Amino acid sequence: MLQSGAAGGRGCALCPLLGVLFFQGVYIVLSLEIKADAHVRGYVGENIKLKCTFKSTSSITDKLTIDWTYRPPSSSRTESIFHYQSFQYPTTVGTFRNRISWVGDVYNGDASISIINPTIKDNGTFSCAVKNPPDVYHNIPGTELTVTERGFGMMLSSVALLSILVFIPSAVVGVLLLVRMGRKSAGLKKRSKSGSKKSSIEVSADSDQEKDDCMGKLCVRCAECLDSDYEETY
């Protein structure tokens, strides 16, 4: 949709927000909107995803195209690194040869790619352009990529976090096992103590036996006394 711009494009601060672009004296209503992260940070050797999404007023067809370009820092030279039209065509030349992977889904408005095994030399600006005829007018967002070495402190913190995640569950399991073993030990002691106590029948039998022993001793003593008295009479 095209409209003449009598004001020469001035005084339209809300145009970008409304999806309107002023180009060569003409207001162009954007029917295709593209979004991408302004800044992305990654680490050497770890794959980095460059996210790009789009919204089109037209249905997706095989005419849809996606183009990713790369511009090094402090340079105006751009390099094509990926092209899509019904199928993905990553670059086969340059520094990004065999290092660009398609991770998007055009039917869900996703035009994202991934950089495999990134290096510090990959720092720069990446631009995502999408065309879905008749929707061809759109903004071209840029993503500033910063790749750095993962520091020793970051590696150490990762190791510490992993150690904590492994140690805490192990410690909890150990404590539970100790508590369970302690309860079992206490139960066995109680059982052994209760098992050593004599029943009321056994206690009564012991008492009767003691009484019989006393009576026997008493009878023997009395017999000895009678024998001694009989001997004194004669």
Image (cartoon, grey):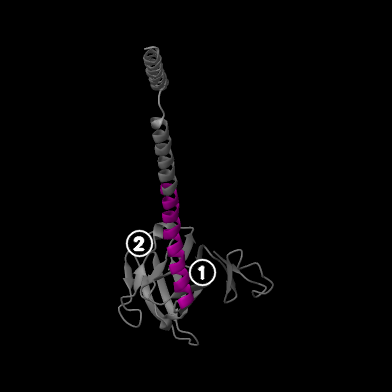
The quadrant in which residue 68 appears is: bottom left
Q: Is residue 163 magenta?
A: yes
Dot label at residue 229:
none
Q: Residue at x 69, y 72 (%)?
A: 11
Spot the residue most to the right. 11
Q: Position of residue 171 (x, y in %)?
A: 44, 55
Residue 121 visible in rendering: yes
Q: Relative to 221, say whether 103 is above or below.
A: below
Q: Residue at x 35, y 82 (%)?
A: 95
Q: Secondary structure at mark 2?
A: loop
> Badge 1: how crowded within 10 Å, few (<14), some, or many (20+)?
some
Q: Amino acid type of disc 2?
A: Asp
Q: Is residue 233 magenta?
A: no
Q: Residue at x 50, y 66 (%)?
A: 34
Q: Position of residue 216 (x, y in %)?
A: 37, 18
Q: Which residue is mark 2?
A: 62
Q: Secondary structure at mark 1?
A: loop
From the viewer's perspective, tell me whether residue 96 is left or right of residue 26.
left
Foreground of the two, 133 or 192 = 192
> Badge 2: how crowded within 10 Å, few (<14), some, or many (20+)?
few
Q: Which residue is mark 1?
A: 37
Main SS class of the magenta portion in the image:
helix
Q: Relative to 36, say whether 221 is above or below.
A: above
* Real-space Cα separation, disc 1 to disc 2, in angstroms: 26 Å
Spot the residue most to the front. 234
- Magenta segment range? 152-177
